[in-house]
Amino acid sequence: MQKIRGIVALLGRPNVGKSTIVNCLTQTNVALIDDRPGVTRDRIYGRVEAELPEQPGFVLVDTGGFEEGKGEHQPFSDNLVWRQTMAALEESDLVVVILDARDGLHPLDEHLVNLLRKMNKNFIVLVNKTDGTDKAVVMGDFFALGVDSLLSASAAHRHGIVELRETIFQKLDADVALNSSNSTDPDAINVAIIGRPNVGKSSILNRLIGGERSVVSSIPGTTRDPVDVQITYDNQSYVIVDTAGIRRRGKVDDKLDVISMMRSIRALERADVIVLVIDASEGLTDQDARLASMASASFKPILIAVNKWDLVAEKTSKTADQFAEDIRDDLRTVAFAPIMFVSCLENQRVHKILAQVQLLWQRSRHKVETSRLNKTLEQIVRDHTPALIRNHSKRVKFFYATQVKVGPPTFLVFCNVANEIQESYKRYMTNRFRSDLGFDAVPLQLVFRGKSEGRGTQHQ
Ligand code: GDP
């Protein structure tokens, strides 16, 4: 469930049924969609998982920017919203254009399809709201677009959603670009520097490169061109992945949340360790929380770097601790991650980032001997017995555990009945594994398996 196959951008005029389609695809009812025009709204909808849990899903993103009739948001003309839309289209692996069957073929639709063709984009056209229409006649109208992937749906009735999902998966698989972007040095630690615009990612990158001789490798042939920077520090080689988005300066699209989000998602896919940068002068925002939860879903070690520490006035010996506590409260999904306070401006502690990255990486590769693991498991259960199972007078019994993987360290824990273990007990056990087995500050995966159960239940 951790990996993604790609980023899918949705594009459609207001009212074509985008939110219904998103809700069907993500299988949630959270209407994350706010149809107000503008650049600040949240455009990341979330992940759509594949049928099989071990296969990668995709991330859905709204490109917005298709608000007809309002001067400052005119599509196809030179305004901020449309520039953002174009950048988001560029950044995506696949575009789903949503049209409205009841409107028939709109002149803007043709214009849009031509634009996507010119951009050489992988795209699907979905005609929604076909219920109550003579589908053959209506679709005949849209065939004039001459596109290969023309689908129809009635999202309000959940018709056509399975086909849409399948076509998206097929189209993403056909896109080789995503899979070709792996870094070159097998011994290097791949690091993603992610964060909102303006938090100082590029300043950190520049500080890290510093006087080092850096090799910049670009992988040509894709529109996105990931650029990796290789650094050697203390005899360890690091590849800072997908720095294109960090380094490209001065263009309006670099500073927009949706683009930085898409680039962050892509970078964290390719990384071994993630550095999440937060701006000390601005405090935490929803966008930070969203990035943190995207990062934690990857089960990769995360280092939180609080930058611009110089801007925090009147610091006392307690300021950093207080700040760290606030971060752990607000970004619960990454509460296990270590936090560093740095200043690029004053060059304080920035160079320590890589040493910390190395430490986290090494820990995430650590393998525990089975005998030690089982002694620890016994002790953990002895220290805190699980509660009684509801309606029975017995308790969950843990038999033994075994580590099946590193990076992320993954443990199978065998017990009598896995689905009776309380969430709080799973958290307790995960935390004890972390502290007692040398996995401080790295994400762990515990899979609980009952006697007669196949897959077991999972806990991070
Ligand atoms: P990015 O968009 O995340 O790559 O952010 P940049 O690296 O471009 O930084 C955004 C702005 O913050 C620039 O004006 C930097 O000079 C400034 N900046 C970066 N790091 C620091 C810092 O530690 N302290 C202060 N005061 N400003 C910083």
Image: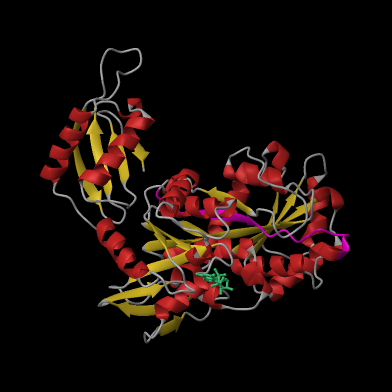
Q: Nearer the viewer, residue 43 or 235?
A: 235
Q: Quadrant of residue 122?
A: bottom right
Question: Residue at point 67% right, 39% down?
Answer: 158
Where the C terminus falls, by quadrant?
top left
Above or below, 363 relative to 51: below
Residue 176 at least partly seen: no
Q: Where's residue 413, x and y in %?
A: 24, 37
Position of 101 with respect to 164 (left or right) is: right
Image quadrant of ligand 1 equals: bottom right
Dominant secondary structure of the residues highlighted in magenta in the image: loop
Q: Nearer the viewer, residue 365 or 236?
A: 236
Above or below, 379 relative to 235: above
Above or below, 295 relative to 383: below
Question: Residue at point 67% right, 63% down?
Answer: 148
Above or below, 222 relative to 283: below
Position of 396 with respect to 183 (left or right) is: left
Q: Where's residue 193, x and y in %?
A: 46, 67
Does the segment drawn in magenta span residue 283?
no
Question: Residue at point 47% right, 79% down?
Answer: 219
Read off the magenta span.
Answer: 54-71
Question: In this figure, what is the number of numbered marks?
Answer: 0
Residue 339 at least partly seen: yes
